[in-house]
Amino acid sequence: MSEDEKLLKEAKKLPWEDRLLHKNWKVRNDANIDLAALCDSITDPKDPRLREFGSFFKKTVADSNAPVQEKALDALIAYLRAADADAGRYAKEVCDAIVAKCLTGRPKTVEKSQAVFMLWVELEAVDAFLDAMEKAIKNKVAKAVVPAIDVMFQALSEFGAKIVPPKRILKMLPELFDHQDQNVRASSKGLTLELCRWIGKDPVKSILFEKMRDTMKKELEAELVNVSGSARPSRKIRSEQDKEPEQEALAEVVGSGPIEESVADVPQAIDEYELVDPIDILTPLEKSGFWDGVKATKWSERKDAVAELTRLASVKRIAPGDFTEICRTLKKLITDVNIAVAVEAIQAIGNLARGLRTNFSGNSRYLLPVLLEKLKEKKPALNESLIQTLQAMHKAGCLNLADVVEDVKVAVKNKVPLVRSLTLNWVTYCIETSNKAVVLKLHKDYVPICMESLNDGTPEVRDAAFSALAAIAKLVGMRPLERSLEKLDDVRKKKLSEMIGGSGSGLPSGTNSAPVQTSGGSLPSMEASEGSFVRKSAASMLSGKKPAQTAPVNKKGVPVKLNASKKGDGAGQLKALKPVENEDVEPADMSLEEIESRLDSLIRADTISQLKSTAWKERLEAIAAFKEQVEGIQDLDQSVEIFIRLLCVVPGWNEKNVQVQQQVIEVITHIASTAKKFPKKCVVLCLLGISERVADIKTRAPAMKCLTTFSEAVGPGFIFERVYKIMKEHKNPKVLSEGILWMVSAVEDFGVSHLKLKDLIDFCKDTGLQSSAAATRNATIKLIGALHKYVGPDIKGFLTDVKPALLSALDVEYEKNPYEGASAVPKKAVKPSESTLSVAGGIDGLPREDISGKVTPALLKSLESPDWKVRLESIEAVNKILEEANKRIQPTGTVELLGGLRGRLYDSNKNLVMATLATIGGVASAMGPAVEKSSKGILSDVLKCLGDNKKHMRECTLATLDTWVTAVQLDKVVPYIASALMDAKLGAEGRKDLFDWLSRQLSGLSNFSDAVYLLKPAASAMTDKSSDVRKAAEACMTEILKVSGQETITKNLKDIHGPSLAIVLERLRPPGAFHDSFESARTVSTALASKNSSKVGKSTSNGVLKHGNRALSSRVNSTKGSRPETVMTVQDIAVQSQALLNVKDSNKEDRERLIIRRFKFEELRFEQIQELENDVVKYFREDLQRRLLSTDFKKQVDGIEMLQKALPSIRKEVIELLDILLRWFVLRFCESNTTCLLKVLEFLPELFDTLRAEGYTMTESEAAIFLPCLIEKSGHNIEKVREKMRELTKQIVHAYSATKAFPYILEGLRSKNNRTRIECVDLVGYLIDNHGTEVGGQLKSLQIVASLTAERDGEIRKAALNTLATGYKILGEDIWRYVGKLTDAQKSMLDDRFKWKAREMDKRKEGKPGEARAALRRSVREYGSEIAEQSGEVSRSISGPIFTRESYPHAELHMERHPIPRTLSPVNGPTDWNEALEVISYGSPEQSVEGMKVVCHELTQATNDPESSGMDDIVKDADRLVSCLASKVAKTFDFSLTGASSRSCKYVLNTLMQTFQNKRLAHAVKESTLDVLITELLLWLLDERVPRMDDGSQLLKALNVLMLKILDNAERTSSFVVLINLLRPLDPSRWPSPAQNETAAIRNQKFSDLVVKCLIKLTKVLQSTIFDVDLDRILQSIHVYLQELGMDEIRRRAGADDKPLRMVKTVLHELVKFRGTAIKGHLSMVPIDMEPQPIILAYIDLNLQTLAAARMLTPSGPVGQTHWGDSAANNPSPATHSADSQLKQELAAIFKKIGDKQTCSIGLYELYRITQLYPKVDIFSQLQNASEAFRTYIRDGLAQVYFFYFRWKRMQQLEGRRRVYQCQLLHQL
C-alpha cells in the first residue's frame, strides 16, 4: 500500500471538517467525492446531516487547487439537490465565495458555478443570488462578468420573472452597457432582450433607454424586432416541485380528464409600476411656485401652475406623501371659469391617480363627487379628460365599486342627463374591468340603480343603464338578476338579452371552461436538477449568434433521457404542446452517422449508400428512389427534419449534376407541402442552397417553387428575414437579383400582411437600389411597385432620399401597379399556425416608428426656452424627427410632444407660431387617427390662431386643419370648430375664413349628420355685424342644410332662438310656407321662453312665458319685413293693465356680481346680448319689450318714448333695473342708426336728472357698464351727437364722482379714434378746472396728456395744449412736476402756451397762475379745517357726512343714495412740512398721500444727516406727526373698503414705518398717541375685510411689520403701560366694523391674544432692558389692572386659564426675578397703605419666595416677613390665604414628582428646599392620606439629602478656609 493510499485511509477516520480542510489536496479531493456521494444517497431533505454539511462549502469552494475546487462544486451541487429551502441560510456566504474564487477559473469550474447558482435560485435564495451578482458584475476582469450575466439570463429564462425579480436586474444593467469589453456588452444586450420577453418591450425601453448611448439604443432597437411572443417559466422552485406528486395522485383519483394548468404556470403580467422607483414630486412642486400660481388672477398662470403639476405627476410611480392640500386646490380648479385650467386640473388628478394608485384612494373619494358633477359640461376636451381620469382612478385601484355606490346614486339623480348617462357608462367600465367576485358581491347595489335609470326620459341614459346591466349579467350570469328583471316588460328583456348575447363572449360558462394548455416551455425542473447543468449564453439572444448546444449528460457521461422518470414523461407530453413562437430555429450540428442511425427502416440502406456514390447516375437513380419512398410514407411529420438533414448532407448542396439538384429540390418541395408541420430548422438548413439554385437558370423554376412552398409552410415573413442576409453577403450578384424577383412573386402571392415592411423597405433602399447591377435595381423597382399595390402612395415617404433617376423609374412602376388597398386579395394563403401571426405595421400595413426615445426632456425644455432661436431649433428638431420616421409615427410619447407644441401656439413670435402650426399638422399626418387621443384638445388652441389679423397666419391654421381632417376625419373636428365659432375672440376675419373652409369641406359630402352641431354657430353668425361673416355663414348654412337633412335640423331647433331661428326656418322651408313653419315651430320657441324665464319662479304663470313667445314672434315677423305696427296696437291695449316694469323678482346685487369691471370698452359678446334679451323679456312689459328688442329702429324709438313718458311715475323701478337699461343703451350706442342714438341721448339726461332728484348715485358696476362705452363713442363723427355726449358725460361726472370717472376718461386717451382722444383731453381739462380737489391725487396722468403734444394730428395737439394750460392756471409752475419727460420741442410749445395763458389771466384780472391754490393753503393753516371745508379745500371722494364708527352700518347706504356736493375750488399737493401735516390731518385719503410724500422726503433727508437741526425740528413734531397718521389709518382703510385703491393705506403705513425706524422719533411719541396708534393697528390686523381689499395680503404683512417695529423702537415704558391697559375689554365703538358672526366676547378675546403676543415680545428682552424702563409706572399699571379685576375674578380666571391675567403675572414675575427684593423700592405709585392691601403686594411676596426657593435670588430678610407696613403684619389678608394655597399646590406637585421614578431625585431636592425656606411648615401633615411606605421613603430621602448637603457645605467651608490661609501666607511672603 502506497503512502498516498495510507494517508487517504487514515484521513477517512477524521471528521468531515478536518478532511475537507486538510492540508493535503488529495485528502480534500477524496473528501469532496465522498461528500457528493453521501449527499446523493440522502433522500430526506430534513436529514440532520445536511444541516451539518451546509457550513463547510463557503471554504471548500474557495480551494486554491483547481481540481479540488471542481469536486467541491460537485459536492455542493449534490448537497443542494438533496436539501430543501432551509439550506438558504448558507446561500449568501457560499455565493460570495463562488463569485470571488470560481468565476475566473476553468470553463468547467465556471459552468458548475453557474449550476450552483441555479440551484440556489431553485431553493428560493434569490436575494442572496442577486446580491452576489451585484458584486460579480463589478469585477475588473471581464472574464468573470460574462458568466454572471449569463447565469442571471438563464435564471430569468428558466424560472421566470415571478421568482427572479426583474427590478434588481434592471438596476444592474446600465453600468454594463458602457463596459469596455464587447462580450460584456453583448451579454447585457441579450439579458435585456430576455427581460423584454418577460416584462414587455415598453417598460424596458422607458426604464433603460434613457441611460444608454445612442449606438446601444440602435443596436437594441434592431434586436427587439426579433423578440416576439410571451415567455413562460420552464423550471419550478423546489417547493412547487414537491407539490407535483400530490397533484398527480389527486388527478389519478379524480380521473384521467384534462389537467388544467396550475396558477404558477400561467405567465403573470409584470406591472411596470413595480419595476420603477417612486419619485418625490412634492419638493420640486413646492419650488416651482405652484401655490402662488394656482392663486393667480390670470388664467394662464393658473394653467401653467397646474400644468407643472401634471408634468411632474406624469412619472410612472410617485412617492407617497401628503397630497391633501393639493387635492383641495385641484377641487377648486375643476370648477374654474376657464375651461383650459379645469381640463389641466382634471388631467393632473388622472396622473396622480396613476402614479400613486392605492395611496390616492382617500383623495379619489374626496374628488369623485366634483368630477361626476362636472360631467355636465359639453366641451369635448373637458369631457374626454373627465372620462379618462375617472377610468384611470378605477384602473389604478384608487376606487372600487364598493367605494362609489353612494356617489353613483347621487349622480344618476342629477338633473343634467349627460351626467346621468356618462356616470352609468363609467360604472359599466368599472364593472367590465372588475373581478367577478366583486361584482357578485355588489350587484345588489347597482342593479336597482340601473333599473331605475331604465325609466329615464333620455335615450342615452336608458342605453347606458342597459349597458351596465348587460355588463353585470356577463360577469355573474342571469340567475342573480332574475328577481330584479321580472319587473321589465318583454321589449326591454329582449333588448337586454340581445346586448348580452351580442358581445361575442356570452354568459359565463361556469366550470365547463375549456382546459388551458400548459406551456411548451415548461420543462420539468427535476430534469434540470437531476441532470447536469445545460449552460445558456445571454449573447445567444442576439441575431446572428447561435447558442452553444451542449447535450445534457449525467455524472457518468451518459445522456439523460427525458423519459427517465415519471416527471420526465410528463415533460415529454408538455414539450409537444410548446408554442411555435418559442421554437428553436437554429439547427444543431449532426453527423451523417447519427442521421443514419435515426432513419431506422424509413429509407433503404442501399438508397443511402447510392446517394453517397461518386457516379452521378447512381446518385440520380438513388434520389429518384428516395423520392418514391418518401412519397409512400403516410405520416411525414415525425421524420421531416431527419429527411431534410440527410438531403443536405448527401448528395448535399455542393452537388454538381443539375438533374440531381432538380430532384433534390423537388423532394424537399414535396416534403414541405405534404407535412402538416414543417419546422423552421429545416428551412434554415435548406435556404442557402435553395437561394444559390435560384441564381442558376436551370434550377431557378423548381427553386422558386420550393421557396414559395416554404412560405406557405412557415410564412413569407420568416423566409424574407433569412434571405436578406444571404443575398447581402453572397458573392454571386445573380443570387441577389433573382432572389428579389422571387420576392416580387411572393408579394403578389401572399400580400404584405405577413411581412415586416420596414425591414423590407430598408433592404430595398440599402441593398437593392444601391446595387451596381442594373438587373438588381430593376428587380428592386418591381418589388417596390408590387408593394405600392398593397400599401399605396405612403410608401413614397420611405424613399425620399433615393436618387432622382430611380424615383422617376419608381413613379413609372407605381402607375403600372396602382393602389388597390383592401381589394387586393392575395393568391395564396399560409398554413394556419401560431408561427404565422400578422406582423403588419398598422392598419395600412406600413410600419410606424416609436419616437418616444427622441422626444427627450431636453427637447421639451428647449421648446419653452426664452430664446426664440432655441425654440425655433426645437420645432425644426421635431420636423427632423418626423422626417427620420418617414412621417409615420406611433402615438407613444406624442402626448408630451403635443403638449410642448401647444405652448408655442401662444408664442410672441408669430413666425414661430406659423412654424408650430405646420409641425402640428405634420404630427397629425404622421400619426393618423391615433392623434385624436394623444392631442388632448390641442385643436381648440390651433383654432384660436384664426383670430390673428395676419392672413398668412390664418392660411397656416387652415392648412393644419386640412391635414388634421385627413388624419382623423371631419366628424372628430366638428365639435372643436363649433366651439371656436362661438368664441367672440376669433374675430370677423377668422370666422369668415372658417366658414369658407367648412363650406368647402361640406360641399364634397352627401350625408353628414354631425354637421348639425354647426347649425347654431352658423345661425348666430348670420346676424353678425360683419357682412363678410354673414355671407360666409349663409353659404355654410346652405351646405349644412344639404348634408344634414330636414328631420335632423328640425330636432335641433331648440338650441336656436331669436332672429337666428327665423333665418333657419326661412332657409328650411320654401318662401310661401314660412308662416306655417313658424307656427309649427311654436313649441320650440315656447320651450325657449320657458328656459329664459326659469329664474323668475312663480312669475312664469303671470305671463312671462307668453311674453317671451310674443317677443320672439314679433322679431321673426320683423325680419320678414311685415307691416309696421303703430305705437299703440291691439296687443298693447290688452296689456295696459300691467306694470311697465316688473321688479318683483329682481335681484340687482346678483346681476351686478356678474359684471366684470373694466375701464376699457369691449364690444358686447353674443352671450351678453342673449342675456340682455332674457332680462328685458323677464322684467319689461310685453309691449315695451317688443319695441326695445325689435330690429326696426322706429319701434326702438317708440319704446324710448314710452319710457320717457312714464319716467316720473316709475322712478324706483328704473333705479332697480338701471343696469339693464344701461346695457340696452350701450347696445344702441354700438349700432349705426343716428335717429335712435339721438333719441337715447335725449332721454339719458332726463334719466340722470331723475336719479339725482331721487338722491341716487350710480354704483360702480353700473358705471362699469355704461361709462366705457360712453367715453369710447364720444368721438362720434357727427358733431351734434358729440355735443350731446359731451354734455352727458359732464352731467354724469358731476352726479357720480370725478375721482371714479377719471380713470375711464384716461382710458379714452388710449383710444384708436382721434376724435375720442380729443374729447377725453378736453374732459381732463374740464375736471382739473372744476373738480381739481377730487382729481388732485391723480395729476400724474397729465403725463399722458403731455405726450399727446407730439401727435401728428394738429387737433389733438391743440386740445392737449389747452388742457395743460388749464392745469398751469391752477397749479402754476408746479405743473412741470406732473408732465413727465418731454422733448425740447414739446417743452418749448408748453412754455409758449403757459406764457399766453398767464397773459390771458392778467387781462381778465384772474390773478397769477397757482395763486388761488396758495391762498387756499393759507386759509387752511390760518382758519383751520372749517374754513377750508367751506372753501372746498377738504373734499371727499365719497359723499355724505363723516361717519363715526358707531354709524358704520349706514355709511354705505349714504354713499350710494346721496348726491355728491360739487367742490368749489381746486388745490394741489403741499410744499413744506407744516402744510403736509395739515393736508394729512384735514385732507381726503387721496389728498393726504401728497402730504405723506413730503413727510417721507423730509424724514429721509433728516435720517441721512442726523446731526442737523432738521432732525431736532422733526423730533419736536414727532408726536403730532404720529397723531395725524394714527387718525388717518382708519380713514384710509375705510376709504379703500368702498372699492377705491389701497394706495393711501400703503402710504400711511409706509410713513409710520419710516417714522418708527428712527429711535429718536419713536421715543418722542407720547403715551396717549401710542395708545391710539397701537389700538388702531391691532384692530385692523383683526379685521376680516382687509384680506379682501386690493393688495390685502400685502397690507396685512405691512401692519405686522409696523407693529414689530413699534415694539422695538418705541419708549418701552409707554409700550408696557399701553399694552397692559389694552388687556381690558375694548369699547365696542372702537372696532372698525360691526360684528357679523362673532360675539363681543370672541372679538375681545382675539384682540387680547394679539396684545398678549406683543407683551411676550417685550418681556423676552426685559433682562437687557430692565434698567431702561420706569418700573414704578409699569407696576402701577399692573396694580390698576389687578385691582379692577378683584380677587374673586382673579380666582375665577385662574381656573379658566385666562391669557391676559397669566400674561400680567408673567410680567410681574419677570420684574421680580430681575430686580429681586429691590422691586419693593419701586412701589411709589402704588398705595400700599390702602385697605384691603393691594393685590400686587401678595403676588410680589409669592414671587420672591418661590424664586428664593429655586435659588434664583436670596431674600433680604426672614422668609415670610413682609415689609409693606404694620397693617400687613398684624392683619391677615386674602393675599396671605392665596400664598398658603399656592404653597399647598407647590407641595402637591413636588409629591407627584417624588412618586415618579424619573423625577424622584429632583422632587426630593425641591422638598428639601421647601423645608429650608418654610421650617415651620409640617410637610407630613400633607401626607396623611399617603401610605406608610411613601412617607418612609420621603423621610429616608430627605435624610440622605441632608447628609449630602451638610457634607457639601462642610467641604465648601474647608475650601474657603484653605484659600484664606493661602492668601495670608502669600501676603506674609
Image (spheres, rainbow, N blue to C red):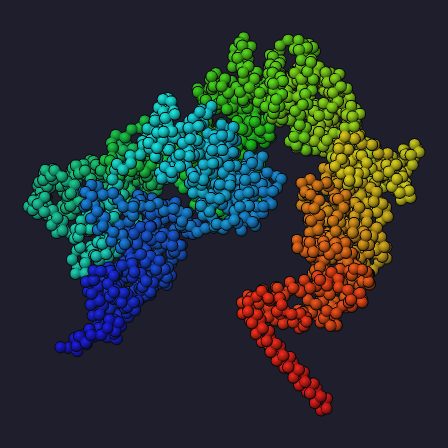
Q: Quarter holding the C terminus?
A: bottom right
Using the image as rendered, state which of residue 1146 and residue 55 is in the foreground: 1146
Q: Name which quarter of the figure residue 505 lies in.
A: top left
Q: Position of residue 953 (x, y in %)?
A: 56, 32
Extreme bottom residue here? 1869
Residue 941 lies, in percent from the top left, at 54, 34
Residue at the spot 33% in from the left edge and 50% down from the top edge: 162
Q: Position of residue 972 (x, y in %)?
A: 46, 29
Counting the numbered discs, the total is: 0
Q: Residue at x 61, y 25 (%)?
A: 1095
Image quarter of residue 1664: bottom right
Taking the image as shown, residue 943 lies to the left or right of residue 1492, namely left
Q: Is residue 1868 left or right of residue 495?
A: right
Q: Nearer the viewer, residue 868 or 441?
A: 441
- In percent of the image, x 7 and y 46: which residue is there? 605
Tell me if 974 is positioned left or right of 784 in this view: right
Quarter of the view holding residue 604: top left
Residue in view at x 83 percent, y 32 percent? 1462
